[in-house]
Image: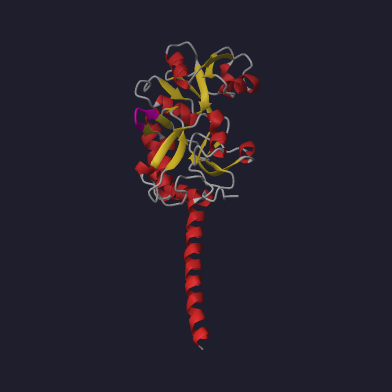
């Protein structure tokens, strides 16, 4: 009887220790979520989250000293807040277009908000939540130019785009074979060429052009034509099969519903007079696959 009454207490003790160990393992598992956040969970918990953005796109993702501004940045902050990360727990990391998939695969960033179009090719190696905005390729012209209403009007005119971009070549190949192409290192240089009269138009996604037009130095000098001729669904880049996709999607939906999405858009690009494609915006985020 003595043995029979003693052993259950030892068993209970071992079981309790096992439960503690199991809870610890569950906690560790949660902290090692596949999105690679430094504390990994959906709550800040004292850790940080590394978010990839562009540093050189005014109105979307822009770094000025220690300040980060733009629509992408505001969406990123909102989503991070919903995931439990306060402003001081966010580390913004520059994510050039050509390096985005690699940065997610290598764990250099936890997610990316950087005019990142959702494509089937990219979805083979990473995951996306969203879209949180639908842009389209468009043209930026001088504010008093009424001769250019779309890409087909560019025959014989000078068009600027960024080195390595396919946007300008697409116009030459598909809309106006007589277009003269000028490549510059960045879009700011293209806008400088436009305001100087060196080129007649600049092309890339409409919201990027709107951000450039909204810079105080460019206000009243240039305008977005407002005739988009492609569909670019901007998504939140995540590591492949991330378990954070649904939480990010829920945050985007909340931003769309409470007015924060529209406010972020107005705050960052409305000075240009740009209005997004109303047939496609506000967007409806897709289900996580």
Colouring scheme applied when the structure was drawn: secondary structure
What residue occupies the far bottom of the structure in this picture?
Answer: 1
Q: Is residue 134 visible?
A: yes
Q: In percent of the image, x 48 and y 20: which residue is there? A: 186
Residue 276 percent location from the top left of the image: 47, 35
| Direction from residue 247 to residue 122 in the image, left or right | right
Q: Is residue 262 visible?
A: no
Q: Is residue 65 magenta?
A: yes
Q: In percent of the image, x 50 and y 49: which residue is there? A: 249
| Direction from residue 63 to residue 113 in the image, left or right | right
Residue 201 percent location from the top left of the image: 50, 18
Does 125 sit above or below residue 144? below
Residue 156 percent location from the top left of the image: 58, 12
Using the image as rendered, state which of residue 150 and residue 186 is in the foreground: 186
Total label count? 0
Q: In percent of the image, x 64 and y 16: which residue is there? A: 177
Main secondary-structure element of the magenta-colored stretch:
strand
First to last magenta residue range:
63-67
Q: Is residue 23 magenta?
A: no
Q: In percent of the image, x 45 and y 11: which residue is there? A: 197
Residue 179 percent location from the top left of the image: 59, 15
Does 155 sit above or below residue 15? above
What residue occupies the far front of the structure in this picture?
Answer: 2
Does 18 sit above or below residue 169? below
Does 121 sit above or below residue 221? below
Using the image as rendered, state which of residue 118 and residue 221 is in the foreground: 118
Using the image as rendered, state which of residue 38 and residue 277 is in the foreground: 38
């Amino acid at each position: 009887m003595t043995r029979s009454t003693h052993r259950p207490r030892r068993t209970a003790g071992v079981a309790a220790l096992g439960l503690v160990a199991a809870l610890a393992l569950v906690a560790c598992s949660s902290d090692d979520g596949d999105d690679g956040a430094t504390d990994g969970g959906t709550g800040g918990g004292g850790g940080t989250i590394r978010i990839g953005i562009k540093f050189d796109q005014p109105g979307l993702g822009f770094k000025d000293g220690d300040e980060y501004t733009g629509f992408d940045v505001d969406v990123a902050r909102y989503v991070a807040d919903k995931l439990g990360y306060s402003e001081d727990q966010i580390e913004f990391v520059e994510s050039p277009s050509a390096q985005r998939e690699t940065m997610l695969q290598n764990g250099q960033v936890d997610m990316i908000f950087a005019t990142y179009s959702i494509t089937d090719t990219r979805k083979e190696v990473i995951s996306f939540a969203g879209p949180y905005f639908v842009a389209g390729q468009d043209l930026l012209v001088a504010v008093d130019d009424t001769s250019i209403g779309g890409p087909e009007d560019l025959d014989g005119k000078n068009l600027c785009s960024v080195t390595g971009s396919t946007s300008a070549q697409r116009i030459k190949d598909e809309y106006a074979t007589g277009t003269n192409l000028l490549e510059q290192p960045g879009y700011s240089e293209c806008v400088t060429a436009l305001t100087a009269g060196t080129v007649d138009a600049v092309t890339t996604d409409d919201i990027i052009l709107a951000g450039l037009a909204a810079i105080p130095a460019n206000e009243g000098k240039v305008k977005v034509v407002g005739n988009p001729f492609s569909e670019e669904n901007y998504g939140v880049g995540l590591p492949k099969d991330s378990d954070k996709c649904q939480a990010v999607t829920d945050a985007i939906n909340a931003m769309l519903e409470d007015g924060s999405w529209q406010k972020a858009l107005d705050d960052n690009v409305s000075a240009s007079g740009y209005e997004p494609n109303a047939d496609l915006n506000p967007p409806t985020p897709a289900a996580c696959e």
